[in-house]
Amino acid sequence: MWLLTLIACASAVGIHFWWRKQFSALQGQRAAEIETSQRRRQQTNVDAKAQQQVLFNSMIEGLLLLDRTQKIYLANRAFKNLFGLKIELRGKTILEALRLHELDELVKRVQAEGQVFDYELKLPDLSERWLRVNASVISNSAGEREGTILVFHDLTRLKQLERTREEFVANVSHELRTPLSLIKGYVETLLDGARNNPEVAERFLKIIERNTNRLDLLIQDLLTISALESGRMKLNLQPVELRPLVEKVFTDLGAKSENKKVRLVNELPELTASADVNRLDQVLANLVDNAIKYGRANGSVKVGGKKLDDGKLEIFVQDDGPGIPPEALDRVFERFYRADKARSRDQGGTGLGLSIVKHIVQAHGGEVWAKSEPGKDATFFFTLLAAANSVTG
Ligand code: ADP
């Protein structure tokens, strides 16, 4: 009997220890599972945050998140770039981080109105930058405010284009109005009786003719610029021998150069460019025409060029006139810019010639620039691609 009791006790103790072992193994397994799932959740959180960061930083728009106390919770890379900030912004107020009262006021307005769209903010720096801001409060599912989101879009380029367009329209109107009002005035004077004096009538009619020609030139130039800028003008690229083309341009401008007793010199070696011959003719004609117009009477205009090491061709047109002041050297390529207004108008210039030259050269993949020693000369350079298998100059 005592033996049976002993066996039963031993079995009970054995079962107890086996069960404890099983139980602690189970417990260990459970704890490991909990730990793994916690670690996985933490990792998922870290991954989500990293993904969020990558996403926010890849945005073109600047993004600013404020917490419910209006302190910065997150500012993406574009936001920092827009405002030129390198410091850590988290935890700062808008005024502390940016010292921008207008933006601070905007945030207050967003709190009051819930959202503000298309707010235009001009940054108070020297470079005149504009931003468009869209902002809204963020609420949770219970309707409680969690913070504020602000999205910043850089409008500077758009504003610049808008201003250029406005200036262009104002310039065009002015340029059209000047000859038109002259034509109108002289026609009225003729009708009022001046036509009865043949000498006066002829003088007035010549003025009318000159101004009609000027209007015609201006409209042609405007149409060319518009076609070039809209990309409607397609280039018909072919091998073009430069020397004969320059000879043709000299012949076309022969009367003008003879009037002013300007000697035209073609110094070009044999070079063949890959170009649209009509457009290249326009470039050379504009540059040679300017050189005659603004150059010295009894002076000379030279056209020359060479093949560069990178295989491109560099062509120049040089006169020995009064030249261009250094501050105007880049600006002469702008539409309607004139270094000497009275002189340009006297000569019937539209103020668009060099802008057309620049567009055409750039459309060919080249560059154009000017150099001048005031009082001595002015030289315009441009580059073109050489035609394949062209002869080296
Ligand atoms: P414009 O019709 O007035 O000649 P352009 O665009 O051809 O217009 O030239 C712009 C300005 O550049 C001219 O008004 C003139 O002041 C200056 N310019 C151009 N070529 C020369 C040159 N060879 N020498 C001096 N000034 C020049």
Image (spheres, helix red, strand yellow):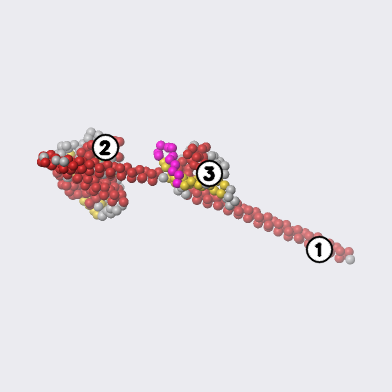
Q: Is mark 1 within 8 Å of ligand 1?
A: no
Residue at 76% x, 60% y is 19
User: Quick check: is 127 in the magenta stretch?
Assistant: yes
Please identify, in this view, whether the residue under mark 3 or under mark 2 is nearer the observer. 3
In the image, residue 342 lies at what x, y percent? 23, 36
Element at label 2: loop
Q: Is residue 14 left or right of residue 351?
A: right
Q: Disc 2 marks which residue?
A: 339
Neighbor class of circle 3 (other Cα within 10 Å; few <14, some 14-19, many 20+) is: few
**Where is the N terminus found, in terms of image quarters?**
bottom right
Mark 1 closeness class: few <14, some 14–19, many ≥20 residues within 10 Å? few
Quadrant in which residue 259 is drawn? top left
Quadrant of the rendered image holding ligand 1: top left
Q: What's the amino acid at mark 3? A: Ala
Mark 2, ligand 1, within 8 Å: the answer is yes
- Mark 1: secondary structure: helix
Q: Is residue 214 toward the left or the right of residue 14 in the image? A: left
- Secondary element at tag 3: helix
The residue pinned by badge 1 equals 11
Mark nearest the camera among 1 and 3 is 3
Name the residue carrying label 3.
Answer: 112
> Dots 1 and 3: beta carbons under 8 Å?
no
- Gap between marks 1 and 3, in whole Å? 77 Å
Q: Which residues are magenta?
A: 118-128
Where residue 268 appears, as percent x and y from the top left, is 20, 45
Q: Are marks 1 and 2 in contact (CB under 8 Å)?
A: no
User: Which of the marked residues, 1 or 3, is nearer the chain's N terminus?
Assistant: 1
